[in-house]
Amino acid sequence: MSSPTQTPRIDQPVEPASATVQHGAKAHSDGGWDSKVPVQTRSARPQSGDIDDFPTVTGREVNWKFAPLDKLAPLLAGGLDGSAYPFLATETDGADVEWGRSDDPRVGTAGLPEDRAAAAAWTARDAVLAVTIKATESYESITITRSDFGTQPRAAHTVVTAEPNAQGIVVIDNRGSALLSENVEIVVGDNARLTVVSLQDWADDTVHVSTQFAEVGRDAFLKHVVVSLGGDVVRVNPSTHLGAQGADTEMYGVYFADAGQYIEQQVYVNHDAPNTRGRVNYKGALQGQGAHTVWIGDVLIGRAGDDTDSYEQNRNLVLTDGTRADSIPNLEIETGNIQGAGHASATGRFDDEQLFYLQARGIPEEEARRLVVLGFLVEVIQKIGAPELEERLIAAVEQELAEGRTVLVAPSAEADGSDA
């Protein structure tokens, strides 16, 4: 007996009489229309915390086309170790650092993965490192030092929360060897002011993928800084959602790639509320055969983003032959009622006029080149607002120029930290 005809639900598409014809055109014989159209914009990417919701990465995807997939393969396959790991944390009365369960309710409050690497780490987490900046009268400062991940494929999940009206800085200082995919969530409460610094001073064999999500509250401010100096492959993708009126963000990046090193940053600012402001400024230097950097900057000004003020830029300084810097700024605007929006990108060698100016005043060429590079990168380093850390990074850049590798010396304050 034949079954009765079923009326499709309102959300259920009705198959046309001929699935191979749309508006008089015929579909290709190798598949349907929907499955063959790639995602064209950052805002349209699917989001999920389940690795099975993301197909195998082929390298043809727009967000993976530059990455060395052979080195990243262990972090894309799943089955990562997401257990707790040892770390050091500076002590302060106005901040808490604690391990939470994998089902901690704070997980997912800032965003969800948009690619397979982040979903693999999300799926594998067994513990969550929770950092909370309390609303006190003082400016709180805390440094999390991580150096014992080992060389097996690992996953990590961190949630940084600034309570409403809180103010402070959180530094995540990465060292040693690692094969790590992680998610970092940042939640900035209403009227809070928070700085988060992600410092990649890894050993030369490290492969690190970090997806960082931020949710900024009403009239709140987030300064987000990415510093990538060490490691073999380092891929840090920070995104900030300005979803409340008056939300403000400044996103800075400094990176220095040596021979054979790959450093990538994909930055996203989503203006999703009125009167929001965004500033993105990333600067990098490259030296040595095979040094490769990638910067992709996406800014979305949504329909609710009236009176938005947004600007992003990327600058790359090429120091030797044999390097490659890919820089791709993108801007989507869905409303005409904005204060302003723009983007810029430039990659080039030394400015001969600057060198001539310095040499004409008796400065040797080698020293002149060092001063030019320092001046180029220090502009961003000084935006951090932590003098001791800024001095460390300036010394690290000088060490890069002198030896082609980074040596960072921990400040004495970290010696007073305790195991958390």
Image (cartoon, helix red, strand yellow):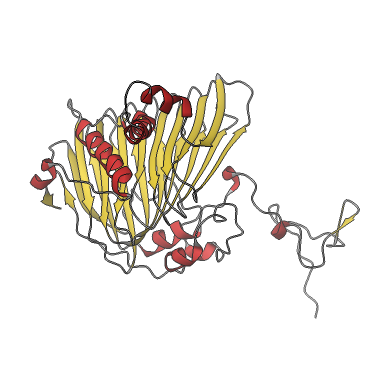
User: Does residue 30 sit above or below 185 in this rendering?
Assistant: below
Camera sees residue 273: no
User: Does residue 242 sit above or below 154 in this rendering?
Assistant: above
Query: Could you tell me residue 190's position as x and y percent?
Result: 35, 29
Instruction: Check the image and name the residue furthest to the left.
Output: 416
Q: Is residue 167 left or right of residue 91?
A: right
Closest to the observer, 121 or 8: 121
User: Does residue 130 sit above or below 374 in this rendering?
Assistant: below
Closest to the observer, 64 or 96: 64
Query: Could you tell me residue 417's position as x and y percent?
Result: 11, 47
Instruction: Check the image and name the residue furthest to the right.
Output: 24
At 49% from the left and 22% from the top, the residue drawn is: 275
Query: Could you tell me residue 277's position as x and y percent?
Result: 46, 25
Which quadrant of the structure image shows residue 299?
top right
Closest to the observer, 287 or 48: 287
**How many labels, in total?**
0
Camera sees residue 337: yes
Closest to the observer, 346 or 58: 346
Q: Is residue 255 left or right of residue 137?
A: right
Query: Could you tell me residue 283's position as x and y percent?
Result: 43, 36
At 38% from the left and 22% from the top, the residue drawn is: 360
Image quadrant holding the N terminus, namely bottom right
Which quadrant of the structure image shows residue 188?
top left
Instruction: Check the image and name the residue furthest to the bottom.
Output: 1
At 15% from the left and 42% from the top, the residue drawn is: 411
